[in-house]
Image (cartoon, grey):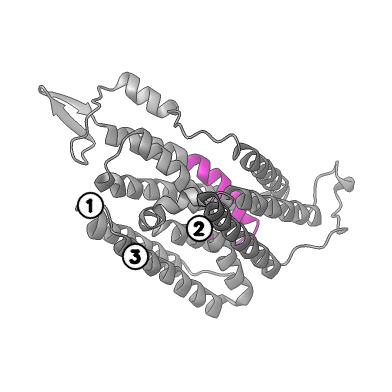
């Protein structure tokens, strides 16, 4: 898949324009979006992602088109699961609803930067070391296991990470918000507000999210352009999705289970691919192993969509039965 430099530049510029637009249209004036506003803009961003995917399909063929849509669906689903953590963090810091859009936008920007770095690192590793697929596959299987296991033990309390604890310990801080400002002056002394601390917490959490998402999408495509755009378009609209889903997040009780199955499936797919390109001397003498057929991308997309549909329907049915 040859992507001209001008296409890369135009795509990145368009994504930056959308982020700037998000700031001026939604974040600059603090407010809590209505259900209608959040729903409308969520549809807008999904439509842009679908149109881009259709264009990619038309230019680079159906195989790459399916890879993009499989990656987009997977990354969007992981983003929704990430919202559970964002809700807990926002609640722990008592962030006023009107200011939460700013926190989320900063989180999206940090996530996009981190994922771009990891995408570049992943592409370089894949280009030079085929055995990295073993590592990606094993990591996804481990992540799937911990995600499935931790769901029943999940705590609703946020534990401050190292960066947050360090900021609280070494920087003068106040417990009071001053609008959506990151710092404020009290008795002539400059102090950080909880708004900065919650952004640090969101940013640090984004690192862990990126570690999960990048190996997952590299299990669906080896094209850096598709990896980048699927991640970027999955992150765009996350702010509006946060407010749209609202209380619905609590009803998606099986979402983590579904994501664990998806990550486990992709992990197995990666290991099978690693066996087909095996170069490790202690595995079959460094010769490829073709005992298991590679999983085609169209089947991967079908499995991912099926798991998400089943887990979503099952979650809503369970929530409905529990309510009664």
Q: Residue at x 47, y 45 (%)?
A: 84
Point out residue 251 in the picture as x, y percentages from the top left corner. Answer: 50, 51
Q: Residue at x 37, y 33 (%)?
A: 92
Q: Can you name the residue that lies furthest to the bottom here?
A: 58
Name the residue tied to disc 1. Answer: 31
Residue 210 magenta: yes
Q: Is residue 59 left or right of residue 43?
A: right
Point out residue 135 in the picture as x, y percentages from the top left corner. Answer: 69, 43
Circle 1 residues within 10 Å: few <14, some 14–19, many ≥20 = some
Instruction: Report if residue 221 is visible in the image.
Output: no
Q: Residue at x 19, y 53 (%)?
A: 29
- Cβ–Cβ under 8 Å for marks 2 and 1: no
Residue 152 magenta: no
Identify which residue, 157 or 247, lies in the foreground.
247
Q: Nearer the viewer, mark 2 or mark 1?
A: 1
- Cβ–Cβ under 8 Å for marks 2 and 3: no
Name the residue tied to disc 3. Answer: 41
Q: Is residue 259 left or right of residue 102?
A: right
Q: Which residues are magenta?
A: 206-224
The answer to whether 193 is drawn above or below residue 70 in the figure is above
Q: Is residue 230 left or right of residue 190?
A: right
| Secondary structure under the numbered disc 1 in the rendered image | loop
User: Which label's residue is closer to the chain start, 1 or 3?
Assistant: 1
Name the residue tied to disc 2. Answer: 76
Q: Work out how far the residue at label 2 is from the one at label 3, CA to CA, in angstroms.
A: 15 Å
| Secondary structure under the numbered disc 3 in the rendered image | helix
Q: Quadrant of the N terminus?
A: bottom right
Q: Work out how far the residue at label 2 is from the one at label 1, CA to CA, in angstroms.
A: 25 Å
Point out residue 48 in the picture as x, y percentages from the top left corner. Answer: 41, 70
């Amino acid at each position: 898949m040859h992507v001209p430099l001008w296409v890369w530049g135009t795509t990145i510029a368009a994504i930056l324009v959308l982020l700037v637009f998000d700031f001026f249209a939604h974040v600059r004036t603090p407010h809590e979006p209505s259900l209608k506003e959040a729903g409308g803009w969520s549809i807008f961003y999904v439509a842009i992602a679908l149109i881009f995917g259709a264009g990619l399909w038309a230019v680079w063929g159906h195989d790459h088109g399916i890879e993009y849509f499989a990656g987009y669906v997977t990354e969007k689903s992981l983003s929704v699961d990430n919202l559970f953590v964002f809700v807990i963090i926002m609640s722990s810091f008592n962030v006023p609803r009107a200011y939460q859009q700013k926190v989320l936008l900063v989180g999206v920007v940090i996530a996009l930067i981190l994922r771009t770095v990891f995408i570049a690192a992943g592409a370089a590793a894949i280009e030079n070391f085929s055995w990295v697929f073993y590592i990606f596959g094993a990591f996804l299987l481990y992540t799937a296991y911990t995600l499935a296991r931790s769901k029943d033990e999940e705590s609703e309390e946020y534990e401050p990470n190292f960066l947050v604890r360090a900021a609280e310990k070494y920087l003068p801080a106040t417990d009071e918000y001053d609008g959506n400002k990151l710092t404020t002056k009290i008795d002539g002394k400059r102090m950080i507000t909880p708004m900065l601390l919650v952004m640090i917490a969101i940013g640090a959490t984004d690192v862990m999210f990126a570690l999960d998402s990048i190996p997952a999408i590299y299990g669906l495509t080896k094209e850096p352009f598709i990896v980048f755009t699927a991640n970027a378009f999955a992150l765009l609209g996350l702010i509006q999705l946060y407010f749209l889903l609202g209380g619905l997040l609590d009803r998606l009780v099986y979402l983590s289970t579904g994501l664990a199955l998806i990550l486990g499936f992709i992990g197995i797919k990666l290991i099978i691919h690693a066996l087909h390109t095996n170069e490790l001397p202690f595995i079959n003498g460094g010769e490829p192993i073709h005992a298991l057929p590679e999983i085609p991308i169209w089947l991967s997309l079908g499995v991912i969509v099926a798991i998400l549909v089943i887990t979503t329907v099952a979650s809503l049915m369970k929530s409905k039965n529990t309510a009664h």
